[in-house]
Image (spheres, rainbow, N blue to C red):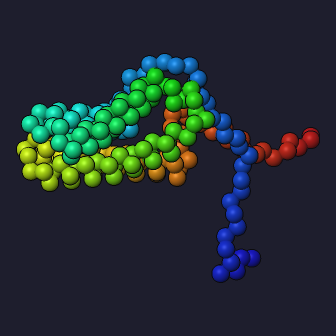
Amino acid sequence: MAFPNSPLPPPPQGMGSQNTVFITEVRFDPSYIRTPPGMLKATVIVLNLLGFICLISSPFRSNGRGVYFNIVCHLGLWSSSVLLLLYLFHVVEKYHNIKWLKIEMVLYIVLTFLNLTTSTIVVAFGNAGYSAAGFFGYLAMVTYGLDAFLKAKALQAGELAQGHRVVNKQVPTSPATMA
């Protein structure tokens, strides 16, 4: 008989195993670009490129503020491009022992902060080209922040950067009765 305030008994646990499957050959897979992380990387690449073009078209492109913005733009552009290529060619899956999600999360947090500071600095300059570049920098900052948030959620959930897990559940059976 169960008492009214007693906790419920734990559910029966089945035996099971969990296997992680990695295909370690390098191959081109364009379907990654249609996933949310792929779209975020492509968006950030375009935003960094637009910010760079806006700032370079300004007559004050060699100002210290502009140089700082361009350095951050190029850092984001090249790191996101390299990561996109690594995912497109499944290099991340080949080297699955590297903590890719954690590396990306830290990189995107740093780039979020850097884009916040550089965009604020160039917008405060007052030039139209600088203001447009700052606008694209702010959009890149939001995109990097969203991607960092998604990477943090994936880390907490124990997800893989690339690849998939196969879960095999075995249902316990009662012993056969002898007839």
Residue 145 as seen in the image, left or right of residue 91? left
Comparing 109 with 165, the one in front is 109
Instruction: Residue at 8%, 36% (x, y): give it.
Output: 59
Can residue 114 be seen at all in this image of the molecule?
yes
Q: Quadrant of the N terminus?
A: bottom right
The answer to whether residue 49 is above or below residue 25 is below
Q: How many marks?
A: 0
Comparing 134 with 31, the one in front is 134
The location of residue 45, given as percent across then percent down, is: 29, 34
The answer to whether residue 31 is above or below residue 119 is above
Residue 62 as seen in the image, left or right of residue 89? left
The location of residue 60, given as percent across then percent down, is: 12, 40
The location of residue 18, given as percent across then percent down, is: 66, 40
Instruction: Residue at 17%, 37% (x, y): give it.
Output: 62
The location of residue 175, given as percent across then percent down, is: 85, 44
Comparing 26 with 59, the one in front is 59
Can residue 146 be seen at all in this image of the molecule?
no
Q: Quadrant of the C terminus?
A: top right
Instruction: Residue at 21%, 35% (x, y): give it.
Output: 52
Q: Residue furthest right?
A: 178
Comparing 130 with 132, the one in front is 130
Instruction: Residue at 33%, 38% (x, y): give it.
Output: 76
